[in-house]
Amino acid sequence: MRDRTLDDRGRAAAGEKIRSVASRSEPTEAGRPPTGAPDDLDPLANAVWWALRTEQRELAEVAGRARRYPADVSVFAGVDVLDAGGWADLATLVGPSGTAALFRAEIPPPPAGWTEHHRGRGRQMTVTADALAATADALADDRADGLADELAATPTSRTHPTVALEMVRRLTMVDIGEVLALVEVARPGPFAERTLEMGRYWGHLDEHDRLLAMAGERMHLEGHTEISAVCTHPDARGQGLATALTRRVAQAILDRGEVPFLHVAEGNDRARAVYRRLGFTERRTVEFAVLEAPAGGA
């Protein structure tokens, strides 16, 4: 399947009409190498662009070398290299005064005309099958602090000590109301009306079918899948629900022969500690920036 350009979809950034970019859109048949040389040949250093270049290419809106998800799927955009041509393609993609949310290993200061509204840093973490399996036995003997108590209730591929499996199920668009309500109170990060379409999301529901916790798959690139939207309703915290779901999602990714990865905002030390207890290790620092394109366009 080929990428859908802004011209094909008739979409516009921030409600503004953007000129057609169909003539500049790059073919994206699987297996073809990109025309540019990415800043880092490690795909996880530029996961948004690589996802939209490979496994999620059917979602891509494209202008030259720049790509983004539809606004109702995800906020993120990407480009292979942030050189003059890359910034120009990004400006064309989002349109005059449009917003680009970048998420990659390093984001240099934008060129003249761009406005930076927000910048943050985080940690990228991955886990292996052996590390995930090893945490089950380690946690059984570790009651040193509250984190260990919380994680002890986490189901593994072998045992499910206290979490009732009948309360866990795959989330679909039928559940979007409950999902968005949980996102509103738990604030796991960017989540749009069609984010569920990016991968498999799982939820833990109570006896009244109220969604208490969730975790799922967001970016998907060759050989790697990101775990995202890990959150728990404030009324249900301390039971290990989201941690159990994280383990479940990670195990499913590993069972497909892929590498699970996730991102934690800098300063969220508790979340980092939880993921470490699950066997995740830090891989690199990543940056996030929200930028406004020049008013006059590219």
Image: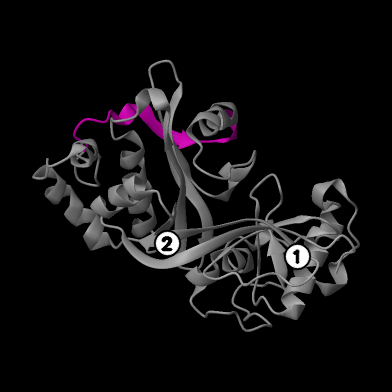
The quadrant holding residue 23 is bottom right
**Where's the N terminus, which quadrant?**
bottom right
Most foreground residue, 41 or 3: 41
The quadrant holding residue 170 is top left
Question: Can residue 7 be seen from the camera position used here?
Answer: yes
Question: Can residue 1 be seen from the camera position used here?
Answer: no
Q: What is the tally of numbered marks visible in this picture?
A: 2
Q: Is residue 292 magenta-colored?
A: no
206 relative to 293, above or below: above
Crowd band around label 2 with a 10 angstrom C-alpha radius: few (<14), some (14–19), many (20+): many
1 relative to 16, above or below: below
Spatial CA span between label 1 and label 2:
26 Å
**Residue 268, image x and y in percent?**
39, 48
Most foreground residue, 111 or 137: 111
Q: Which residues, given as a range, are shown in magenta? A: 160-174
Report helix, strand or loop for mark 1: strand
Judge left or right: residue 149 versus residue 174. Answer: left
**Where's the C terminus, which quadrant?**
bottom right
**Residue 144, image x and y in percent?**
12, 42
**Residue 273, image x and y in percent?**
29, 50
Which residue is found at the position 63% from the left and 69% from the top? 53
Most foreground residue, 151 or 31: 151
Which residue is found at the position 17% from the left and 48% from the top? 136
The quadrant holding residue 163 is top left
Crowd band around label 1 with a 10 angstrom C-alpha radius: few (<14), some (14–19), many (20+): many
Q: Which residue is mark 2?
A: 124
The amino acid type of the residue labelled 1 equals Val
In the displayed image of the protein, which residue is found farthest to the left? 141
Judge left or right: residue 167 versus residue 95. Answer: left
Q: Which residue is mark 1?
A: 62
The amino acid type of the residue labelled 2 equals Gln
